[in-house]
């Protein structure tokens, strides 16, 4: 019944499959509980900021 | 001011209307507080896993 | 597998029992899915604000 | 490392930029920590309710 | 900058250390991003329910 | 009705008061909506990790 939520950039379904499988394995080992739930949240670069700057703005700078 | 967040699969607006109305009624009864907020989150089956397997993969297995 | 999180003030275990039972019933009805999870979060009045004012400050004003 | 999540209606990227910059400034001042993360969540009016009524229904009433 | 939140029962600091280290490794591998943040939330058995029943009530039944 | 949740280290009530007031002001300005809710979450250093290491472990290293 532990619940893992992971916030990150958009990824393909193959990566989601591996992410869910491996995060679940870790939680099962540590808690000794089956029935782990994983929620994957995909955030657009314009909806996340670090140090006050949107990720979409960091990217456009870097590619200049 | 209590806040209810519900994570589930996508549903139609008629179901959302009933969901919000009924969850709010329960919270008002228990807390004795008006002004309940409800947030409905709709998750794609490829963004949720239980027991290490994505929901979208469980579904395709079941329909084989 | 739907997950309900409810943020509210501290309450007793009897109320939690009723809250979990009734919120679960609503979600089962709407989604047609068993295995609902409910997380109850209890927030101290100094950790919640509405309209810019902490709940603990609203209370002390009201009782003056 | 403090994390600010803000749930609101959809807004344009220019407003997101200002929101992230200003929320970060507040958190840096209060905590005295750099490296603030901001997550902006945009909710459709049919996914949010207050006092048991979806926001999309309140709007259509008001405009009648 | 991905953020992992894990909701589970209370655990000791040694388990938290291993949990954080291993969840981070998984996220780094999948996203190819360093700077993963992990938030561990410990929930009392009276604040979590599955299928409408508080975890604290399931436990007391099982030990009868 | 926008909701701001802020995850950070424990702080005193005076700082919470200023945090709530200032975050609310920013959200009111950007969204043009009153009735902002702020939730402050205080996390113990053993419940947060960055780059795979618990904050409580970073601190003890730094003070050596």
Image (spheres, coloured by chain):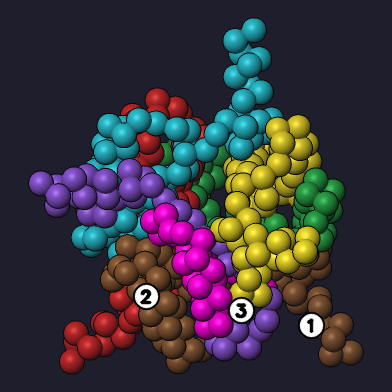
Chain colours: A yellow, B cyan, C red, D purple, E green, F brown
Looking at the rendered structure, whether the residues under marks 2 and 1 are on a common chain is answered as yes
Q: Which mark is residue B12?
A: none
Residue at which label 1 appears: F59
Cα separation between marks 1 and 3: 13 Å
Q: Which of the two discs, 2 and 3, sits closer to the camera? A: 2
Q: Numbered disc 1: what chain?
A: F
Please tell me whether residue B11 is drawn above or below residue F18 in the rendered image. above
Q: What residue do we see at 45% from left, 92% from top?
A: F14
Q: Toward the viewer: D39 or E40?
A: D39
Residue at which label 3 appears: F9
Residue at which label 2 appears: F29
- First reached walking from the N terminus: tag 1 or tag 3: 3
Q: Secondary structure at mark 1?
A: helix
- First reached walking from the N terminus: tag 2 or tag 3: 3
Q: Secondary structure at mark 2?
A: helix
Q: Most extreme residue toward the right, as rendered?
A: F64
Q: Is residue C8 visible?
A: no
Q: Which of the two discs, 2 and 1, sits closer to the camera? A: 2
Badge 3: how crowded within 10 Å, few (<14), some, or many (20+)? some
Point out residue B7 in the picture as x, y percentages from the top left corner: 47, 42
Screen quadrant of the N terminus of chain E: bottom right
Point out residue C20 in the picture as x, y percentages from the top left corner: 38, 46
Badge 2: how crowded within 10 Å, few (<14), some, or many (20+)? few
Q: Numbered disc 3: what chain?
A: F
């Amino acid at each position: 019944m532990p619940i893992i939520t992971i916030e990150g950039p958009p990824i393909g379904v193959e990566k989601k499959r591996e992410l869910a499988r491996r995060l679940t394995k870790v939680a099962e080992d540590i808690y000794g509980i089956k029935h782990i739930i994983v929620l994957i949240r995909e955030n657009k670069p314009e909806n996340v900021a670090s140090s006050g700057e949107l990720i979409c703005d960091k990217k456009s700078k870097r590619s200049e």
